[in-house]
Image: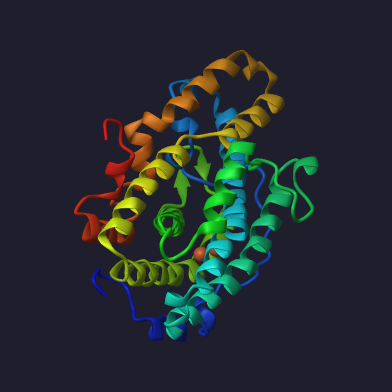
Amino acid sequence: MIIDGISSLDQILNLSIDPEKQTKKIFFKPKKNAPALFEEHTQLYFTNIYSQLTSIQKLRYNQLFASFFIEQFIVFEEDFTNRILQSLLGTPLIKNNQLLSRSLNQMITDETSHSGLFYEYNSILLPRKLSGKKGNRFFTKLNRFDKILFHFFLEFSSTRLFFMLWFLMAVEEYSLFITNCLKKHKKSKLGCLDPNYTKMMIEHSRDEARHVQIDAHLIHYIYINSSTLVKKINYYLLKLFLKNISKPKRGGLKVVNQLMKEFPELTKYRTTFKKELGLLGKNRDYLESLFSPGVIPKTDSLFRYFYGKSLIHLILPGN
Ligand SMILES: [Fe+2]
Ligand SMILES: [Fe+2]
């Protein structure tokens, strides 16, 4: 493989039957008084208004954001990843590559089982009326425009229109980054992290570590079979897509809305919250916390191999 740390598809498929490398269902009981993520992996941390919050409010924001974070994975994996992969599996180019087809099918099987892990955690951590039944997504309802946009790209996703695979690889690698941070440091400024959340993320990462490598093979295979024009078009589509997606939207605001419901004294900041979250799409520190080479090293190396620059350059202000 052209970048480091990527095994062959044969090796990856063999790992997928090793119980140690597979995500399994686990049983846990989230701690109600512990933070789940590091503050610097939440959105409000990058706003000025965050410093006005009390420790208790910060702690609750952290828990709500952590629920939102895993809910995004549910949506991402059920609606996004599996639909893209299904659509690619029907194309002649992928059909011609048996190993890759088998790997993508394995990935779909893996992702289908992951949401149960996340739903269970959220059903305990979120207020009763917000959680519960499968299919009940509280934070991540897309607006009509984004729904149409997603539907359009997912329907037409193919070996010609493949820019979203970069996003897929980046998100899967980002989840590994967050898991590694949680594994390494068990204590944050808000207190000891909930070991159950970490346990859940570690469990999830067993499959994701293989997925990132399959993504690399998939992107590489499609690229070497694409024309220069197709590569260029996908570059610009990716740029548009990432600029749109990296700005916090309704989900991030819904987390803050829930916080204001639980702490009505914060409602005086409603406009400030909205304004400051809206500005994060142009906040260098925030964008680097999501897409810098240190966070998504494999995605970045592969992108640099094909385009000669870091992926983060597509979204930093001024580019
Ligand atoms: Fe997953
Ligand atoms: Fe995955």
Q: Is residue 295 visible?
A: no
The way the protein has been coloured in the rendering is rainbow
Residue 159: x %, y % from top left: 42, 66
Q: Quadrant of the N terminus?
A: bottom left
Residue drawn at 27 percent across, 35 percent down = 319
Vertical arrangement, residue 91 with respect to residue 142, above or below? below
Nearer to us in this view, 281 or 39: 281
Residue 214: x %, y % from top left: 41, 72
Vertical arrangement, residue 225 with respect to residue 257, above or below? below
User: Along the horizontal axis of the image, is 183 left or right of 263?
Assistant: left
Vertical arrangement, residue 167 with respect to residue 16, above or below? above
Q: Is residue 178 visible?
A: yes
Residue drawn at 55 percent across, 24 percent down = 54
Residue lying at the far top in this picture: please name it: 268
Residue 274 figure quarter: top right
Residue 147: x %, y % from top left: 61, 44
Residue lying at the far left in this picture: please name it: 308
Nearer to us in this view, 248 or 127: 248
Nearer to us in this view, 250 or 144: 144
Vertical arrangement, residue 123 with respect to residue 10, above or below? above
User: Along the horizontal axis of the image, is 276 left or right of 195?
Assistant: left
Residue 229: x %, y % from top left: 28, 56
Residue drawn at 65 percent across, 62 percent down = 117
